Image: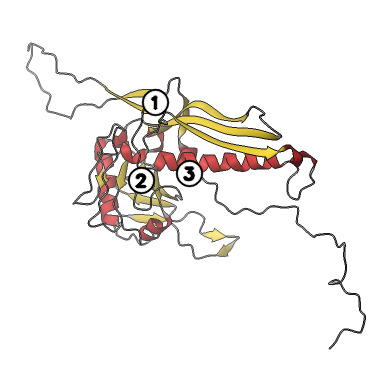
Amino acid sequence: MAQPSNTFDSYDAVGIREDLSDIIYDVSPEETPFYTKCKKVKATNALHEWQTDALRAAAANAHIEGDEITANARTATSRLGNYSQIFVDAVSVPDTDSGLKKAGRASEIAYQMLKTAKEQKRDVEKALMDSNSRVAGNSTTARDLAGMPAWIKTNTSHGANEGADPTGDGTDTRTDETTTLLAFSQTRFDTVMQSIWEEGGNPDTVYLSAFQMNKALAFTGMNNQRSTIGASVGGTNAVISAIDVYVTPWGTVSFTPSRHNRSRDVFICQDDMWTVAVLRNTKNIQLAKTGDSERRAIVTELTLVSNNEKASGGIFDNTTS
């Protein structure tokens, strides 16, 4: 087939209006499961402090009638603290934008600020789960909060060579294994779950990467049972490869895939024993006008509180491929 001579087709036309959808599609993940689950409390100092304590071990306790009573030796509480970290993201948009007609958004500055707030929330999640020690900061050094791995020391499974637990007060990080990484396994998981139970913890949630989640899907054994919630999708039978609830003699936990913790780390957490202390709530701040543009910033200041690390645990130094 051929086009008739002198046909004026769309390729010759000038002035055809563009066909641009008025929707902006973004599939970037916004979930921040750990940050979202943490209870938020008010901080009133850049160094937020708290105390932990523990009961003595159970012992034989029998006395004769009329016996002289002697006071037991007592131990003081432990005082811990973490520094607030300042999260800042800024946007600058020329004032010319106010006169432009755009697809997908009426105001560029509003669109960019909304996007920036979502990005910063992910930064907060990453900081809370990173293997960072706390930094007091000064006029030339930013304050850093100590992430979750810097607090967990009692209930852990890690490499046998360089792998080592931190002090547990946020002042140092755990030492990563470099010689031989270990596969994430049901045996290691159950061992840490038992240790948490023995220390008095009641964990709720397991945070792990997609790679380690696939390892967890293979957990088997008569002493553990996996159950899937919602086995029927849309009223039809469905094959579901997911662990919603994992039941062990040491407690029941849900598995939550996390995109922001290191794949080599698996955290078993008692949710109410992790808190975020907020010194400054997330705020959209208008910056001083220094030229022909509008400048705004998103600012948040907060820190992580490990109310008592014995209630949680971690399986560290896992293989990631």
Question: Mark 2: which amino acid?
Answer: Phe
Q: Residue at x 27, y 40 (%)?
A: 197
The quarter holding residue 43 reads: top left
Q: Position of residue 168 (x, y in %)?
A: 27, 34
Mark yes or no: residue 254 visible.
yes
Indicate left or right for 283 with 39 as reference: right
Contact (Cβ within 8 Å) of mark 3 with mark 1: no
Q: Nearer the viewer, mark 3 or mark 1?
A: 1
Q: Position of residue 303 (x, y in %)?
A: 43, 31
Label 3 crowd (10 A; few <14 / some 14-19 / many >=20): some
Image quarter (top left, top right, bottom left or bottom right) of the N terminus:
bottom right
Give the residue at mark 3.
Answer: 33
Relative to 24, does residue 303 appear above or below in the rendering? above
Give the residue at mark 2.
Answer: 267
Can you name the residue that lies furthest to the front here?
291
Whichever of callouts 3 and 1 sits on the residue coming sooner in the sequence is 3
Whichever of callouts 3 and 2 sits on the residue coming sooner in the sequence is 3
**Marks 2/1: CA–CA distance:** 32 Å
Which mark is drawn over residue 138? 1
